[in-house]
Image (cartoon, rainbow, N blue to C red):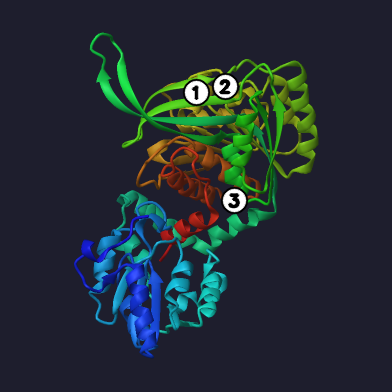
Amino acid sequence: MAKAKAADIKSGKIKSLEELAEIIQKAKAEKRRVVQCHGVFDLLHPGHIVHFQEAREFGDLLVVTLTPDRFVNKGPGRPLFNEHLRLETLAAIEHIDYVALNEWPTAIETVKRLRPDFYVKGSDYANSSDDVTGKIREEEDAVKEAGGRLVFTEGFTSSSSSLINRFFSAYPSETQEYLQAIRDRYSADDVIGHLKSLSALKVLVVGEAILDQYCYCKPLGKTPKDTIVSTQYLREESFAGGSVATANHIAGFCGEVALLTTLGPDKKEEEFLRGKLRPNVRMESVRTPERPTVRKRRFLEPNFMTKMFEVQYLDDRPISGGPENEVLERLKTLSEECDLVIVNDFGHGMLTPKVRDFLSGCGKFLALNTQTNSANHGYNTVTNYKRADYVAIDGLELQLASGDRYGDFRGMIGPISEKLGVKNFLVSLGREGVVMLTGHEWGQAPALAVRVVDRVGAGDALFSLTSPCAYKGVPPELICFIGNCVGALAVEIVCNRESIDSVGLYKFIQTLLKK
């Protein structure tokens, strides 16, 4: 892990954690009381100055530890200022004696290492129930274990996020106006409350598991004697994708998740996929001995994540005989145990006409996502189903389902929604955000992504989290907002390297809706 070194920075106040620990040890030997503050401090304002001034009064030496860029969990576009600028700014404040860059996501390990006499937080942290991370209690335990006390300042409070939202937003004016309208109608607690209400749900996810593989290569150019573009192999990485990724996203918010999927004969692939499941996901697999687990191998240039080409290992003919019958039998049992069924239909053969008919008629709330890809282009549309309660697809998939290549998206949604009896129909439009039809009411929300690292899996993440929200009757405008928040976080994750984290989503929502 990279550490801040005194040689790398201008101010003599800035130390490494090792150096700071030695300074504190000497200060304590001299009977001096040590005070520690910790935070992101992305945009310093008068409230921070008062906070540091009051904190300094608790002791003789004030040290401030800073969250490094890689652990700032406030959503896309944050921190506004990098860790080096934030360190230098803190070091310029006269009340602060020393500053150090933290090495962990939270202050817990740092407190244990530095052992301050007082660990000081602002008054907005005094009520631990307001802390969505749940870390304030752990920080307090660490302080007590180190022989210190957790105390709070009482000066006026302000918010870096609020100031950034007002004066330094990375979003265009239209998006800022949209966010202000959401702030006027809902608080962050309102939105987070809806998400926390999903925790008691029992969810069944149905669809193909996909083993995503990224082979990172360095392009070398055309070979001298042939018409081939040559690349140099660097490394590779595997991810649990498809319905496995969907189940993992949902499991971060819902209590029990069952996953029904099909797997090929390779036991090592199954072991890998099972090893990537969250603890509250139970995977039930139907073995297909004559066909492999779906595997998609993409070749990429790693610096810009540019995808060069893809090789798919699959047999996408509809399953039949024993495997199809087993899928139907398992569906009958599992659907009776759940509150809602979430279907990821990638069009790779698991979801046959018989399986689709069963899902359409099972009587459970049915959330449906059908995907178009190079293997099923034009054949795998949402109209293959007879009924759904919630549909989330992208613009191209809507065009294919409607048979209309150039028409208005809103004009396409209505007839399909009526045909399927869909209560909520959401269409993701990439950089243009989402549009949603609920009954006869339309909703639209702009995209909230600031930086796109990888789009693979982002649509699955959006579908995963908005589906239980639709089941719980969350207002449609909040479903759009939540979906775009999830999408913004997902496009900053390489493939399905990580699942959407509830704390990360909650903090992003708090950041966006800070008044």
| Direction from residue 310 to residue 439 in the image, left or right | right
Marks 1,3: beta carbons within 8 A: no
Q: What residue type is labelled 2?
A: Asn
The secondary structure type at the circle numbered 3 is loop
Quarter of the view holding residue 194 = bottom right
Work out which quarter of the rendered image holds the C terminus and state it. Answer: bottom left
Q: Name the residue under label 3.
A: 252
Marks 2,1: beta carbons within 8 A: yes
Q: Distance between the residues labelled 2 and 1?
A: 9 Å
Q: Mark 1 points at which residue?
A: 373
| Direction from residue 263 to residue 15 in the image, left or right | left
- As displayed, is residue 487 above or below residue 385? below
- Foreground label between 1 and 3: 3
Q: Which mark is residue 380?
A: 2
Residue at the spot 55% in from the left edge and 30% down from the top edge:
211
Q: How far apart are marks 2 and 3 (CA)?
A: 29 Å
Q: Position of residue 183 (x, y in %)?
A: 44, 60
Q: Residue 78 or 289: which is nearer the viewer?
A: 289
